[in-house]
């Protein structure tokens, strides 16, 4: 198959924390990205559908979010393997496994609690959402609930603020990231979470771990273990991609889309 230079040809795409069902989900950007990706496999690393938000607000998915679901199903019908690793916000799907063996796959879609991924370079990664590490990085329930409320508020303000920035031709600015980077407690939590995840991979004899959950994209080496966090689609809009040569990259999707769209506007030089 011939690919346009404006499309992304990769082996595997890793996405997490899309939170379909929330108003802070950047579904339009994700849909644009998915339509430009050609890959062999998509691994969804949890919190794809936010069942908590849907239940609390008694509201389903908006049109753009439904289009994301339809695009993923279309990719599965085209023969792309879809692996759905469940997280805490879509943990309701975990109950399905007790009644039906979705982990064996159905129409190219595999539903599971964790997944083992081997790259084209032979490295083995354990793929989990990461909420299981919360027990090792303890935070008082009241403080956790308060932090979640503050974060949700920041995302709403962030969305409004960045609409104004877009109209002025300015790039996306993450208010939530700025606040996290200045909070000692948040930085400690992120650090401890990363150590817990890397330790888990080491104890299971994997080369690395790919996870999500904390909405902080990263690619780190921790005691000879590769720690990769996919980020989220409420704020960072990032993904992990495995290229055709087996190399892994943390991709800032809005920046990638801007660069591709800019290339399309360049005049074509004919030799």
Image (cartoon, rainbow, N blue to C red):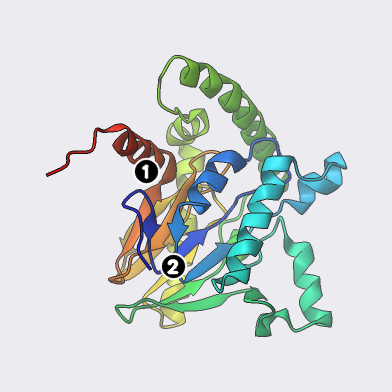
Image coordinates for residue 30, horizontal then vertical, percent: 54, 46
Q: Of the numbered discs in the image, which one, if any, rests on residue 12?
A: 2
Mark 1 is surrounded, within 10 Å at the Cα level, by few (under 14), some (14 to 19) or many (20 or more) other residues, namely some
All told, the count of numbered labels is: 2
Place of residue 198 in the rendered image (x, y in percent of width and height, measured from the top left): 42, 67
Q: Secondary structure at mark 1?
A: helix
Q: Earlier in the sequence, mark 2 or mark 1?
A: 2
Q: Residue furthest front?
A: 271
Locate the C terminus by quadrant: top left
**Residue 267: image location, x then y, percent:** 24, 33
Other-residue count near label 2 (Cα within 10 Å), few / some / many at <14 / 14–19 / ≥20: many
Is 73 positioned to the left or the right of 126 in the image? right
The residue at which mark 1 appears reads as 256
On screen, residue 84 versus residue 124, left or right, reads: right
265 relative to 32, above or below: above
Q: Nearer the viewer, residue 82 or 9?
A: 9
| Closest to the observer, 186 or 91 | 91
Can residue 29 be seen here? The reply is yes
């Amino acid at each position: 198959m011939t690919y346009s230079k404006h499309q992304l040809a990769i082996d595997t795409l890793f996405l997490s924390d899309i939170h379909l069902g929330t108003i802070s989900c950047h579904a339009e950007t994700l849909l644009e990205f998915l339509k430009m990706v050609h890959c062999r496999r998509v691994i969804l690393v949890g919190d794809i559908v936010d069942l908590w938000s849907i239940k609390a607000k008694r509201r389903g998915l908006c049109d753009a979010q439904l289009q994301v679901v339809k695009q993923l199903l279309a990719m599965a019908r085209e023969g792309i393997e879809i692996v759905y690793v469940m997280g805490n916000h879509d943990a309701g799907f975990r109950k399905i496994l007790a009644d039906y063996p979705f982990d064996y796959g159905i129409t190219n879609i595999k539903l599971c609690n964790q997944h083992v991924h081997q790259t084209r370079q032979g490295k083995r990664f354990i793929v989990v959402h990461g909420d299981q590490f919360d027990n090792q990085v303890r935070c008082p329930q009241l403080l956790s609930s308060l932090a979640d409320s503050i974060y949700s508020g920041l995302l709403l303000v962030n969305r409004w603020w960045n609409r104004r920035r877009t109209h002025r031709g300015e790039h996306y600015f993450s208010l939530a990231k700025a606040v996290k980077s200045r909070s000692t407690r948040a930085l400690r939590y992120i650090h401890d979470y990363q150590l817990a995840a890397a330790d888990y991979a080491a104890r299971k004899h994997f080369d690395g771990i790919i996870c999500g959950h904390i909405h902080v994209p990263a690619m780190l080496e921790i005691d000879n273990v590769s720690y990769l966090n996919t980020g989220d689609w409420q704020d960072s809009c990032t993904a992990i991609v495995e290229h055709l040569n087996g190399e892994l990259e943390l991709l800032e999707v809005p920046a990638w889309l801007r660069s591709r769209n800019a290339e399309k506007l360049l005049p074509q030089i004919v030799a």
